[in-house]
Structure formats: C-alpha cells, structure tokens
C-alpha cells in the first residue's frame, strides 16, 4: 500500500549571495513525493472452436471437415481476423467402423466486439456442430504493458511538476528546472472481480485489467521572482 503523497519545501537562502547569484546558483528547492497511475484493459482475446466429423471412409471424413473449416476460415477473414491456427486429429473406431476427425481452430481476436459477433454468427449458422469455451483468454499484446508502465511514470512526473508549480505560485516564486527525478516504487496489480458470474465477459475484463502505480521523488529549483523596477 502506497503512503499518501508528501511534499516538502526548502526555501533556505545563503545571506552572502546576491539575488543574481541566487538565480544562477539556486539553493531554494521544492521537493515532492508524488504518484502516477495508468490503467489498461486487455486488448487481445484468444479462443478456440472445436468441430468433429465421422464417416466410414477417410476421404469422406476429410471432405466433410474440410468444408466446415473452409466456411469458418472465410467467416474469420470477413471479420478481419487473421491470427488463426488450425489442428486436425484423425482417429478410427473399430466398434463403429468409423473414421473421426477432430479439428481445433485457435483464434486471436483484437477486440471484444469482433469476438462476440464472430462466435454468435458461427453458432447461428453451424449450431451444435461446433463448440467453444465460455471463458476465453484475455491478455495484453506484446509491448502494451511496457507502454502502460511508461505512461504511469510520465503521469507521476507530470503530477509532481504540477504540484511543485502550484506550490511555487502560492509562495510567489518561479519554478525552475528539475534537479532530480527519481523513481521510488512501482506496483502492478490486476483488476478485482466484483460480480457473481465468474465466467462472464465483463468479469473476465475486470480480472485482466492491469493498473500500474509509480511513485517518484522529484526536486525542482525554486527561483525568487525579482520585483519590477518603477
């Protein structure tokens, strides 16, 4: 648990220095402990479809499964889903004298709307000839978490400068350049599920939403404003 943000102001001034020297060699400082946050929902959804076909010959079962796979792949292309992997397994049952092919199509969706629309359409057209899991995998694509951490750090620095500027203005000072910006702590947490349905789409989005909190220590110059000559 992060402690509340703290701020310290140092306005010590060497009495032997002139105002010009104070501006050139600033001993007045504003020191800030501040935090920044960034939150990101998962931007990828991975799911799979399973389908079966059973026939009395190998050629017949291959043709049967191939027609359905081609239809599914065309539907996925129509929905701009290009990250698809297909697996097929052939088996034979002596008891039934049938050849069976089990096909599995692994699909990576880039947004929740495409995921829902595509699966709803395929179920409408193919019914119980296909099956898919009710709890797909929600995750962040490569580079997204790095981007999230960077944004949290930038937010922390922005917040520290904004607070330092407010303090300087309150004390009738001018905020100078940063002397030191140091990252003190980084925490990364997953979302908390608030609902009762553990396999709902919304609950999966909540559970896989990531929040990054960054705490920084920053020191800024604090320059005394010169009085305008009359």
Image: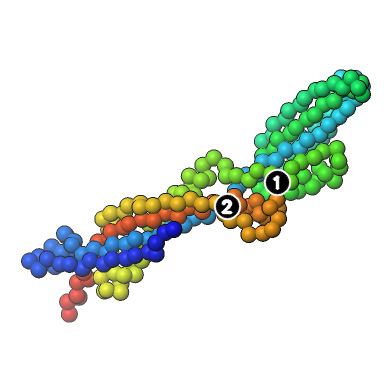
Query: Which residue position holds label 1?
Result: 135
Q: Tell me where residue 9 appears, x and y as whole percent.
A: 26, 67
- Going from N to C along the chain, the mark reached first, 1 or 2, is 1
Residue that extends furthest to the front in the rendered view of this protein: 95
121, above or below 61, in the image: below
In front here: 135 or 219? 135
131, above or below 53, in the image: below
The image's colour scheme reads rainbow
Q: Tell me where residue 50 appears, x and y as whole percent.
A: 78, 35
Going 91% across and 22% down the picture, which residue do you hit? 95
Going 92% across and 24% down the picture, which residue do you hit? 96
Residue that extends furthest to the left in the rendered view of this protein: 16
Numbered disc in front, either 1 or 2: 1
Q: Tell me where residue 202 appears, x and y as whole percent.
A: 67, 55
**Image quarter in which the N terminus is found:** bottom left
Residue 86: quadrant of the picture:
top right
Left or right of 75? Residue 24 is: left
Residue 223 visible (yes or no): no
Query: Which residue position holds label 2?
Result: 209
Q: CA distance from mark 1 to mark 2?
A: 15 Å
Which secondary structure lies at badge 1? loop
Going 66% across and 48% down the picture, which residue do you hit? 111
In front here: 215 or 91? 91
In front here: 90 or 45? 90
**Image quarter in which the C terminus is found:** bottom left
Going 31% across and 54% down the picture, which residue do you hit? 181
């Amino acid at each position: 648990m992060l402690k509340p943000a703290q701020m310290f102001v140092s306005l010590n001034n060497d009495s032997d220095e002139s105002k010009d020297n104070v501006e050139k060699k600033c001993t007045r400082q504003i020191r800030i402990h501040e935090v920044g946050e960034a939150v990101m929902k998962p931007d990828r959804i991975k799911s799979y479809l399973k389908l079966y076909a059973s026939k009395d010959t190998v050629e017949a079962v291959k043709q049967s499964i191939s027609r359905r796979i081609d239809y599914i792949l065309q539907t996925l292309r129509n929905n701009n889903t290009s990250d698809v992997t297909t697996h097929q397994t052939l088996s034979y049952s002596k008891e039934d004298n049938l050849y069976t092919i089990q096909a599995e199509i692994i699909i990576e969706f880039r947004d929740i709307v495409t995921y829902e629309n595509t699966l709803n359409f395929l179920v409408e057209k193919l019914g119980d000839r296909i099956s898919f899991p009710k709890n797909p995998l929600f995750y962040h694509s490569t580079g997204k978490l790095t981007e999230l951490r960077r944004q949290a750090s930038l937010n922390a620095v922005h917040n520290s400068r904004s607070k330092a500027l407010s303090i300087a203005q309150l004390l009738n000072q001018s905020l100078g350049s940063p002397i030191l910006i140091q990252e003190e702590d980084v925490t990364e947490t997953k979302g908390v599920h608030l609902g009762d349905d553990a396999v709902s789409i919304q609950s999966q989005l909540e559970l896989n939403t990531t929040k990054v909190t960054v705490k920084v220590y920053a020191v800024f110059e604090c320059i005394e404003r010169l009085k305008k000559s009359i």
